Image (cartoon, grey):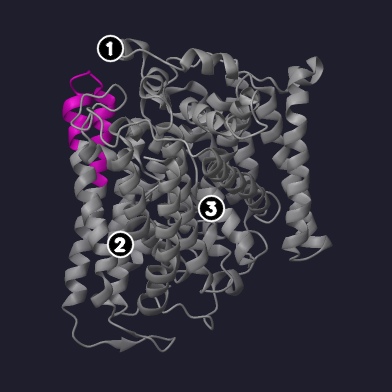
Amino acid sequence: MNALTLVFVAVCVFAIAYRTYGLFIANKVLNLDTARTTPAVKLADGQDYVKTNKYYLYGHHFAAIAAAGPLLGPVLAAQFGYLPGALWILIGAVLAGAVHDMIVLFASVRHKGRSLAYIASKEVGKPVGIVASWAVLFILILTLAGLSIAVVNAMFESAWGTFTVFATIPIALIMGVYLQYWRVDDVKGASILGVALLFVAILIGPYVASHPALAGIFTLSKKSISLAIPIYGFFASVLPVWLLLCPRDYLSTYLKIGTVVMLAGGIAMVQPTMLMPAITQFANGGGPIIGGPVIPFMFITIACGAISGFHAIIGTGTTPKMIGNERDILFVGYGAMLTEGFVAIMALIAACTLVPADYFAINAPPAAFAKLGMQVQDLPMLAAAVQENLAGRPGGAVSLAVGMAHVFSQVPFMKGLMAYWYHFAIMFEAVFILTAVDAGTRVGRFFLQEMIGTVIPKFNDKAWWPGIISTSFIFTGAWGYLVYTGDISTIWPLFGMSNQLLASSALIICTAMLIRMNKAKYAWITAIPGLLLAGVTMWAGYLQITTIYIPQGKILLATLACIVLAMIVVVLIGSIKRWIELLQIRTPTVDAYGDTVLVVAEE
């Protein structure tokens, strides 16, 4: 199959979906109201609740939700062949992921920009809200630690990548001050300024790496970067959102989307062939990268590229506090997820254009690859071209960078620059992931403030600096410790399962909200994907526990997996019981905004 065909299909599917299904949900299901005051306006505080231009906010939101998942998940799932991954990304992003992101964001906007746990307590009940709080906190710590380790592995001992990533911080501060004080809301001017400075930083990167003194400053060890990332996360959580977090994420979006567009352009020019078969012999299980069968393991391997519970954390964290107009929920929520789906398609193509034997040699441990009886073909040439050892580098990041560099190096006038493109791709992956770490840390701070606030009400005051600093320190310290010690690397496989269970829970909680809003006839748009995802993910979790964790003696992982499953089951049962209660109400009422609802929910 020609890779360009898949790119064309993805663009058409996502464009049509936005103009049809996305508008249907916005107009018929949610009735997005431009006249209704959003929390960003009603609760404006200049710290977290800040009305933000929708394009600027789209950049922040996309940067926050698009982390390792859409890059690495599709690469690892290429083990099954390109067809299962492509189908799940296209169908899942349109009917599940984008629906999830849009409706969760809407729910938070209608609940003062509060968290998923708060929404659960108001829409389902306090017991479910409490369990959801702990489930989200647990999953968020796991996620941020795992994402940070991915950044550490991409940046350590790489002066070029580290310099460029670090350079985005002062550039973001300049943009934030520019927009807040110099040229208020001049997003175009800030964009030109930021992109120009970022372009300079990217060009300077190779020279920094080749200069002995500068290279010594930016060539950091794993331990040094493991300390630097939580410190950055702390400041991103504490400082006003307009100063660092939002401009840096917006700036990073130019690099993210720009690189993906470049990759799509490269594919259009080179028109590489998908060398990986549509379906491989590992679809039934026994693969060297993913041991289980394509169903159900596909659905927890490709997470963020199709649907992700982490998006619910961001969609009820920073983003709803910056929505200035309810109509922006369609563009920011549904639109950003479709963009992430396109990123996942690009990652899948980059992996599948490699020779299968070379792909497995990179992503499988050497002992596992030896058992396959395959002979590498282009790998020695690729390793020499990028000036790195590529064999036995599992995790997806290296093979993705090689695949991207391989495409770019075939573009006219780019021959001989494969080493440059490889290191550029590694830096791109680090930036891609780090933007989710900073936003996730800020959301974690919100969560802790809400949870502690139930006992100490003063913590509910989002402007109280002792509460902001203490909760930021505790939360950052929790995931930062796991990053520094490296223990989270053994727990990372839990993320795929817990992430998808959280997404299914968010959909099912939002189903209760739709029924309460007297929209029961549309409740299927969240109920069907939510229940299907819950079923297939629990199946995958059961297989992980019984066929992988327990046989390998990984009792801790098995125990943690059981805890996650138990917490999510409580949320699902409580939500479904609430569905039944609401469906038995026969007399609607009218809320303060003039909308006909079954029950008036406290905002």
The C terminus lies in which quarter of the figure? bottom left
> Between disc 1 and disc 2, whose residue precedes?
1
Residue 373: name its quadrant.
Answer: top left
- Which residue, given by chain and number where applicable, does mark 3 sit on? 62
Residue flagged by tag 2: what amino acid is it? Ile
Distance from disc 1 to disc 2, alpha carbons, whole Å, reads: 48 Å
Circles 2, 3 touching at the beta carbon (< 8 Å): no
The N terminus lies in which quarter of the figure? top left
> Between disc 3 and disc 1, whose residue precedes?
3
Distance from disc 3 to disc 1, alpha carbons, whole Å, reads: 41 Å
Residue flagged by tag 1: what amino acid is it? Gly
Q: Residues within 10 Å of mark 1 (few under 14, many from 20)?
A: few
In the rendered structure, the answer to whether residue 128 lies left or right of residue 239 reads: left
Residue flagged by tag 3: what amino acid is it? Phe
User: Which residue corresponds to the image point at 38% horizontal and 74% vertical from the top-left?
Assistant: 24
- Which residue, given by chain and number where applicable, does mark 1 sit on? 373
84 vs 596: above or below = above
Q: Residues within 10 Å of mark 3 (few under 14, many from 20)?
A: many
The spot of residue 78 in percent (x, y) is: 35, 33
> Between disc 2 and disc 3, whose residue precedes?
3
Residue 157: name its quadrant.
Answer: top right
User: Could you say which disc has been placed on residue 509 in the image?
Assistant: 2
The spot of residue 318 in percent (x, y) is: 54, 56
Q: Magenta stretch: give its range.
A: 542-567
Residue 430 among magenta residues: no
The spot of residue 367 in percent (x, y) is: 32, 10
